[in-house]
Image (cartoon, rainbow, N blue to C red):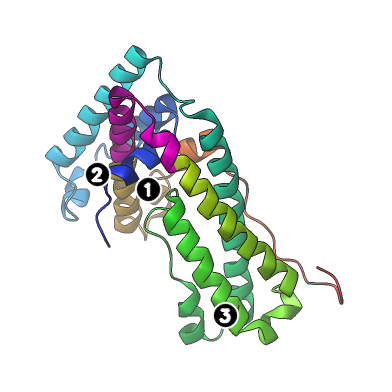
Amino acid sequence: MNPLSREDFIELGVSIPAAALVGWASGQLAATKGKESRLQTRGVNGPTLEAIRDLAAIVEKRAKELGDGDDLPPQAVAVAQHLREEALAFRRTGKLMANAEFGTRPDLLAKFRTGVQTGLLLANLTKELETLIALLREHAASLAGIGATEPFMARGELLVEKLKDAKAGLDAACRALSPSEAQQCHDKGLLYDQTRKLVRIGRLEFLLDPALASQFNFTAVRKERGVSTRPELKKAKAGGH
């Protein structure tokens, strides 16, 4: 996994409102109470949690000074977010098709489990879609009956092109931020990334205890971004799209 660049952190930060981000990070820190000894075995120690707490305080303080800046830059962020959610829905549907068709063939199913480093980053999501579409085309004969039709894959390819355009627009808008706004977005992105890692570690450590694992989640931050619900897989009609 390659480390994220400053530009990556700014892209992450500009995509999430500061208030929602700080609230989510604070909630995940609260979820660690009483579980410190377990989490420490996976590298989450006092300094790790304190770093997240300090960063959240910095983001919250600067948001008040800047007027939050959550709508900067509004058009580019709105376009990117709309396409991001559409692409994630396409990705979920494609993987659901693979699970339905190849559930008894783990070696083949593993090819569809490529994942992304950070799904909010448009470049990573674009690469993920390109890989998924190539796999769907490779196994089109098996998957066509459950929806992996040519129109479906063409829609994915169009999404890829739109994501590339949105990435260029978002990059340009981020470069136009003032130094203080750019620093705030960088710190928001860093806070998101550090809290995301905490969530994943918490889920992994308490994998065998669903009640505890569920306390580590993305619910608050995803709800604020308006993430759509998971799609259901429908049988394709003959000659339909």
How many C-alpha atoms fall within 10 Å of the one at disc 3: few (<14), some, or many (≥20)?
A: some
In three-dimensional space, the C-alpha distance between marks 2 and 3, rounded to whole angstroms, equals: 35 Å
Kindly identify the amino acid type of the residue bearing the numbered disc 1. Leu
What residue does disc 2 label?
A: 35
What residue does disc 1 label?
A: 212
Q: Nearer the viewer, residue 2 or 170?
A: 170
Q: Identify the mark nearer the N-term, 1 or 2.
A: 2
Query: Horizontal placement of 196 versus 170: left or right?
Result: left
Could you say where residue 191 lies in the image, as x and y percent from the top left?
A: 30, 37
Secondary structure at numbered mark 2: loop
Query: Horizontal placement of 28 versus 37: left or right?
Result: right
Question: Would you say residue 15 is visible in this rendering?
Answer: no
Kindly identify the amino acid type of the residue bearing the numbered disc 2. Lys
Question: Would you say residue 167 is visible in this rendering?
Answer: yes
Query: Horizontal placement of 212 versus 149: left or right?
Result: left
* Circle 2 or circle 3, nearest the eye: 3
- Looking at the rendering, the stretch of residues picked out in magenta corresponds to 171-191
What residue does disc 3 label?
A: 103
Secondary structure at numbered mark 1: helix
- In the picture, which quadrant includes the C terminus? bottom right
Secondary structure at numbered mark 3: loop
